[in-house]
Amino acid sequence: MGCRLAPKGIVAAADALPRRVSYESATVSRIRDLVESEPRCFERDCYAPGHVTASCWIVAADDGRVLLTHHRKLGRWLQLGGHADGETDVLGVALREAREESGMSDFEPVPALGPDGLLDLDVHLIPARRGEPAHEHHDVRFLLRAGAAQALARSAESIDLRWFAPAELAALDLDESVLRLHRKADTWLATARAASA
């Protein structure tokens, strides 16, 4: 499946992503700097400035709905994802988290803006809590298609887990970075449909 986005792959893929606005260039630079300068950047206890995480925007193969989790600790609807815990294959991390947090097993990375389904990059601050200082998540985000007819099973990290039609997302008070994932995925999928028609 091409490069599996280990450290050098992250840098190359980040550099290849189209940058439409200035924050994307700054985000690419911040993630590149972390991966190139901090050997422990895939460990969750690397706090200065933070560590690499991976997440995924999951679309249903049959009807285009999107899967979101209502995160127990953060109290918000988010895409599925989590810590690398030392794993340097961030696509593998995103797939692992998708399986663990949804109970489903059939996922396919959708070739998106970058290799292996790479869709977006984001750096966001995680507030200090119980033994953890404030730190950054350098999130590498993928576009995944979930196979049809799979049952959901919510993990302990989630208050709720649900499929949403794209039109329902506006009512969820989603963070801008989550809305950006939706916009990028929607644009890419529409372009891919038009090209195959």
Image (cartoon, grey):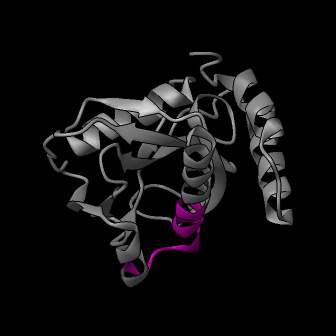
* Residue 190 pos. (x, y %): 57, 54
In the depicted structure, whether residue 91 falls above or below residue 196? above
Is residue 138 something that shows in the picture? no
Q: Please name whichever residue, 39 or 53, is drawn nearer the observer in this view of the structure.
A: 53
* Residue 107 pos. (x, y %): 35, 32
106 in the magenta segment? no
Name the residue rendered at 83%, 64% in the picture: 21
In the depicted structure, whether residue 1 falls above or below residue 142? above
* Range drawn in magenta: 172-183
How would you classify the magenta stretch by its main secondary structure? helix
Name the residue rendered at 69%, 36% in the picture: 114
* Residue 157 pos. (x, y %): 25, 53
Name the residue rendered at 27%, 44% in the picture: 101
In the depicted structure, whether residue 149 falls above or below residue 76? above
* Image quarter of the N terminus: top right
Is residue 147 something that shows in the picture? yes
Q: Please name whichever residue, 135 or 147, is drawn nearer the observer in this view of the structure.
A: 147
* Residue 174 pos. (x, y %): 45, 75
